[in-house]
Image (tube, grey):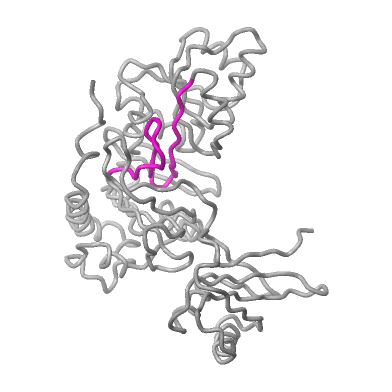
Amino acid sequence: MKMNFDRLEIRNPEKREADDFRALRALLKASKSKAPALARQLRGIDISRLKDRASLATVPVFRKSDLLALQKARPPFAGFAATKTGALRRLLMSPGPILDPEGYGLDWWGTGRAMFAAGFRRGDVVLNTFSYHFTPGGVLFESGAHALGCAVIPAGPGQTEQQLDAITAFSPNAYAGTPDFLKILIEKAEEAGRPATSIKKALVSGAAFPPSLKDWVTAKGISACQSYATADLGTVAYESLGQPGLIINEGLIVEIVKPGTNDPVPDGEVGEIVVTRLNADYPLLRFGTGDLSKILPGLSPCGRTNKRLAGWMGRADQRTKVKGMFVDPAQIDAIAKAHAGLGRLRLVVTRVNEQDQMTLRAESADSSAGLVEKIGNSLQVLTKLKGVVEIVKPGSLPNDGKVIADERPIG
């Protein structure tokens, strides 16, 4: 029985790294003249020197949070697409609206690999409940199913009565959609006396899939895996059956950086997911997703050799307004860089006597009044706001990627 989608999944990690950076250099050289926004991002960068992650980190991160304004200024794709609009396969819109291209090619979104890892095989019938209306979700998963040789029911979300009719008529053995809608379908089918027992496998995405829900789905006789995908990047990472963590997809270089900065963090530290996509139509370079995660140690027991993400761990955009002024994670990172020997920093924003108050907690073995004063001065210079500084023991702040914690009451 075929155990892998292809041999790329089981490459020696060092070979993968060398292959990916070789492909990156070729891609950037070919795309730079076609994608003016990419050329601006590469200003001052010698492409021939991009041979490893350290050199890649010299390229500024381009964040999704900036994409809407850039696309409005230069529609449709802000100058990041290397293929002319009329030569693309589909022109899509995500909420925002963010405009997304799809090019030609087998499994353009990289979802077939995730479906294979979830147990999907040629001849399966897939009930695809992701939306086909403007957004990429439906075609993202359909293209992966077709890459495997599966038949697809293009159901989209909602309309549970029609969904049950389709399940009765076609007996799909596989499901693609959000995990919560899978639960709704199963419950509605049971209430109607039309149990959806044909469905035996699922690839879910787009919503949380906690252990309690996974156990519930498993109890219904369905083996389910989750994937992490975005409309800009396609499938970024995916589970394999019964194995922990989400394996990073091929054709991507994934970094974890300090929120709001360009700086990679060590494996195991929580930070923002930044992705470089090796795609000739839409060659996104150091694209900051705004999502938090961390790299898990070791490799997956399934035999795939790429790094693994811990899964989605929240949002990285912690920019917060205090006393009418925005405070950004990058400002807190600048404080850390200004004072040698500091560990993690966390700015806690509270409300005291009907006024905003900032407390900067900094890990350090030095708790002297002199250091407290210096950090306090840096905080005021960088944020234009006064705050309290607390020195805490090294390693005592949570490893959750949170740089700014807004603890003010809501309402």
Residue 173 point in image, percent of width and height: 43, 16
Can you tell which quarter of the image residue 237 is in? top left
Residue 410, position as x, y percentages in the image: 76, 58
Q: Is residue 342 above or below residue 67?
A: below
Residue 157 left/right relative to 63: right
Q: From what the image shows, is residue 258 above or below residue 191?
A: below
Q: Residue furthest right?
A: 353
In the picture, the quarter occupied by the C terminus is bottom right
Percent from the top left, x then y, of residue 90?
38, 37
Residue ID at (55%, 35%): 211
54 relative to 190 in the view: left or right: left
Q: Is residue 66 visible?
A: yes
**Taking the image as drawn, is residue 281 in sight?**
no
Q: Residue at x 43, y 38 (%)?
A: 227
203 and 220: which one is in front? 220
The percent coordinates of residue 64 (x first, y second) are 46, 56
Confirm whether the magenta stretch covers residue 231. yes
- The magenta-colored residue range is 222-250
Image point (27%, 74%), residue name: 44
239 sits to left or right of 25: right
Residue 229 falls left or right of residue 411: left
Does the segment drawn in magenta span residue 253?
no
Q: How many labels sit on residues?
A: 0
**Quadrant in which residue 103 is drawn:** top left
Locate the N terminus and report the quarter of the image it occupies.
top left
- In the displayed structure, 98 sits above or below 63; it is above
